[in-house]
Amino acid sequence: MARLTDEGDDPYLWLEELDGADAARWVWNRNAEVVAALTHGAAFAGVRAEIRQVYDDEEQIPYPGWLGDGFYYNFWRDGTHPRGLWRRTTLDQYRRPEPEWDVLLDVDALAAEEGENWVWSDVAVLRPGYDRALISLSRGGADAVVVREFDLGSRAFVVDGFTLPEAKSGVCWIDVDTIYVATDFGPGSLTTSGYARVVKRWRRGSLLAEATVVHEARADDIAVYASHDPTPGYERDFVGRFLDFYRRENYLLTEAGELTRIAVPEDARWDVHRDWLLIRLRSPWAVGGVTHPAGALLATRFDAFLAGGRDMAVLFRPDGRTALSYHYWTRNHLILGTLADVKSRLEVLTPGETGWQREPLAGVPEVDHSHIVATDPDHSDDYLLASEGFLRPATLRLGQIGGTVEVLKREPAMFDAAGLTVRQFFATSADGTRVPYFVVGDPDAPGGPTLLTGYGGYEQSLVPGYDGVIGRGWLARGGTYAVANIRGGGEYGPEWHRAALRENRPRAFEDFAAVAADLVTRGITTPAQLGIEGGSNGGLLMGVMLTRYPALFGAVVAQVPLLDMRRYHRLLAGASWMAEYGDPDREADWAYLREYSPYHNTNGDSSYPPVLLTTSTRDDRVHPGHARKMAARLREHGHEVSYYESVEGGHGAAANNEQRSFVWALTLEFLWRKLRGSDPGSVALPRQHAPTNEPIVDGR
């Protein structure tokens, strides 16, 4: 059967209509089918209950955030508060097994009072002062939010305070009476990616329409931004344009409204702390007579740099197996988090008259993956450190650079890890590249059901972590779990990412296929018992595995996936990802995109493993049309496909713990049935060619 070649050949464009009657009827029926097929047995009910216990467990660590006022802030969800509580407490209270929390906002009570399906999104608290906040709430978990000013003292929203209607907005405090706001100001104020093109300074008591324009982006940029640094004695304002997903044009904005270009490379990440400018390179940079490699971290004095100085201190230089993961400032020090073959290392760097001194960060366990949770760069050298492993629950420690380290919280075990181990292997990809991956399970068990996951995009790293859902829903049932650290991610820095960028995307696919084959070669599993799962960009990876490497797998799950590479840039935020994948409207780019676009490479001549596609109607990042159209095309060709679409939840495909439990139980039950050969059988699905008046079936 012929492949789709262009938009004009697409018979399922109608499924891109989010609320169209035909599309809604189609979704309703697909949901009814999968609910009837997977959710009525005792096994599903059991795994769903186990997963819900994990999400609602009140003994989980309530990870805090620091704002600078001495409180430990936390957003908490459980069975009693499914929408969540924004709350805070003191250090003395936090040390206790059951702290007394000061609840600032009860989202469940707010949603009930206002009759809105509110989902917590974000909060920006005024610094200094810490008495006002700009709270972002979404309807159903979408990226678009409503912004409302909140008084922390009275625990109430401010009457006639700063308020923005639903939009993909960005806000930042300047002072108690002034904020920066980037939002939908009306026609012409958004980019083609759907984000704000204009940022304004908005003063209290004035209308939003009267706000002063501060900076503008072009229509084909991703977005505009403005930010204020309130550090006492170092107050600064910055504005700029996101040219694409990785490049920015940045300026210092003076009180007189003048712009001074911050002349770092467009694709570099940078930040300013007091006197210091840090520059993290994504590509090589020749400066001051020296060429610094991609992945390096440089430091220089900010004012000197603006004046033309280019004296750089090299704080980190990557090698073939080590990459910088992140950095955090404290008041007087810099903490670097690095990965060496995907294993964490943490160092403390201290600037001095003779240069930067470095030493290991105290309190970091050797065997776990550790990461910084919070620092307080305005006031102290304290830090919060979390350490965990695939089989080791998290421990949260409070430390002070040069001082003591104490354990604050330990997470309880969510599953029995007796007899299980963590092993790291390296597969050899098609071009000879060594690709690391982790395997969690019983090393002495015969080859059996194995779940392999991966992502491979946007320089995001998959690192070891304790996952009670996978533990209870998969490992406890006797399954093996594997994580592939393929190219496109950040495990080995920007070069590892660039190796799978744009026309080189197939390197990520080849890496994942190599890991799958290596699992079989080592006797850990067989193709029929190997299931795979991935979401978003990882959902694209799953789609390619389905259509390009179907013989390697026994079942596939793609969550909130990106699948139509011809139209992705026309759907919601898709235009912002063209730096990652390419521009389908350019003939040269479409030439390589069409070779792997899962939607366009689905056919009836190949045999595919069973596939489950999940998404959300309220996902305003990756359009649900990707999953809808893929499911329809698979059905058209007679393949076994299950489809489930949540009516809310945004890009996370779930708005609360109940929904998260359902979607993950659906995922794991589907995989377990298919890989164990215990599926009672599926009814032949009718072929579908057009938006017919499909009846709504029972069981919805």
Image: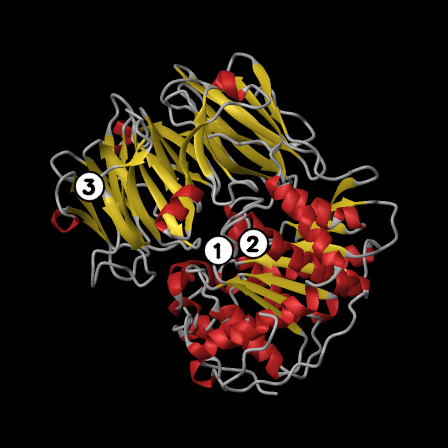
Q: CA distance from mark 2 to mark 3?
A: 35 Å
Q: CA distance from mark 2 to mark 1?
A: 8 Å
The N terminus: image quadrant = bottom right
Give the mark count. Answer: 3
Q: Quadrant of residue 488?
A: bottom right
Q: Which residue does the numbered mark 3 point to in the structure image?
A: 160
User: SS at mark 2?
Assistant: helix
Disc 2, disc 1: CB below 8 Å? Answer: yes
Residue 560: where, in percent of width, then height? Answer: 53, 61
Q: Is residue 432 visible?
A: no
Badge 1 crowding class, 10 Å Cα cut-off, few under 14, some 14 to 19, many 20 or more, is: many
The C terminus: image quadrant = bottom right
Q: Quadrant of residue 18?
A: bottom left
Q: Which residue does the numbered mark 1 point to in the structure image?
A: 649
Q: Is residue 61 left or right of residue 145?
A: right
Q: Amino acid at mark 1?
A: Gly
